[in-house]
Amino acid sequence: MTPTPTLAASETNHPPQVQSLISYLEHEAQPMIVLDPDYNILAANTAYERQFGTADRPYIGHKCYRISHHYDVPCDQAGEHCPMKHAFELKGPDRVLHIHHTPRGPEHVDVELRPILDGERRVVAYVERLTTVRHASARPSKEGLVGSSAAFNAALEAVQRVSRSNLPVLLLGESGTGKELFARAVHEASERHRGPFVVVDCSGLPETLFESELFGHEKGAFTGAQNRKKGLIETAAGGTLFLDEIGDVPLAMQVKLLRLIESGTFRRVGATETQQADFRLVAATHKPLQQMMAEGAFRQDLYYRIAAFPIVLPPLRERRSDIPLLVDSFLQRGSRSGQRVVVQPAAMALLQAHDWPGNIRELRNVLERARLFADDGVVRAEHLPEWLRAPHGPHTQPSAVSRADMSAAAQSDEAIRRLVADGRLSRKEMAAMAGLSERTFYRRLKALGLGGN
């Protein structure tokens, strides 16, 4: 007979409320831990052990911030939001999205903390529920959203918060910021994730076809309608309808779109029968909708219907620290031959210095071009477009790096640590990428505490 799993817990005597709580949490399917007011982990359920625990890394009795972040001080003292501090002040729950160190590497984790109060409303413990975010990665990934910067995490946290509801979401941001990926993340984190995710490119549909594509049509509804056709609204039943570039919807169609959202019903073109719609609405645009409302180009009533929960997506220039993650991800995704492609630190310095007015889409295009020149699997500065290498080329701000800066960047401690952490190159290859002799590179490794045999 298989024994029942028991909750991992410290041997300290706990108050009765805490002891009862520890026993209760073992039956929870979600990873959960119990903390005392001094940040010590008192207990963890089996779900936590399976997802976050390792045999060689004990966590019971250790500070939560050391386990999750490898910090020496609480998160708020390290410049991050600390849910425990807020929960203590509010005497109520708090929630935050953090990047935790896990057995699989850094991961986005949705943390919900609830204080446990005694009869005098004093906090005696906390319960922390942890949900790993599966639709975004804090490491290079072959698919989906990638990022770990503060600006990226703020947008991702907003996605996590709204996904559990059925509110319409409006994604705002410049072209190329990944609106469709964020829309898909809303869908995948929602209760409708098993349903379809249907994309409608509003800018690519002429007004004459918009209504029939969206609502469908009956046979004979217009010239060329030889058969009944389901519209995209019906296709999205049970799932999410993503209206990309909703700012391009003609005014005449905005009225019908508003009626659809308000009533939840629609009719195929040429039909008399009304049908019930069943979808979650996510819309996106790079256009200034509020300015368009003032100019009469976008209906005010439609705007307030679709903008129940607006999320502003950051441009790439506001998340420069994500560029190495994005670069590695795009190089993984574009690899057809199986050859590993890496970027020389000097080239990476140039990529991080650029302002990227075309955002992630522009970065991806530059990398696809550079890959074609990287015959040995290393993207160097000379493989990048001339305008990107010029000190004051197109779109490049005066703060762009010079050739001397590139050399310094290639040999920086951060660049060397990144090369070692990558783990895919030999020491000789890493030295070449850093522009150092192998002997000098070895001395640098030892000085940084990274030296080995």
Image (cartoon, rainbow, N blue to C red):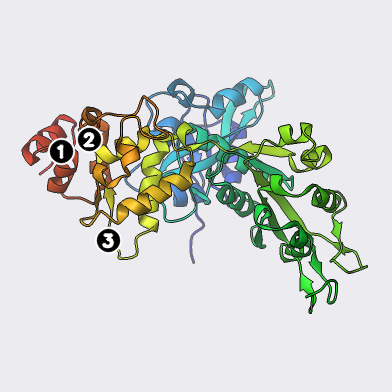
Name the residue that disc number 2 marks.
Answer: 410
Q: Do the residues labelled 2 and 1 touch (CB within 8 Å)?
A: yes
Which residue is at 81% across, 60% downward? 277
110 or 151, which lies in front?
151
Report if residue 218 is visible in the image. Answer: yes
Amino acid carrying mark 3 in the image: Gln
SS of the residue at dot 1? loop
In percent of width and height, residue 425 lies at 20, 50
In percent of width and height, residue 204 lies at 65, 56
Task: From this view, report whether residue 225 is shown above or below residue 297.
Answer: below
Name the residue that disc number 1 marks.
Answer: 435
Task: From this view, report whether residue 416 is shown above or below residue 220.
Answer: above
Which residue is at 25% across, 37% downward? 346
Picture quadrant of residue 106 = top left
Mark 2 and mark 1: Cα distance apart in space: 7 Å
53 or 123, which lies in front?
53
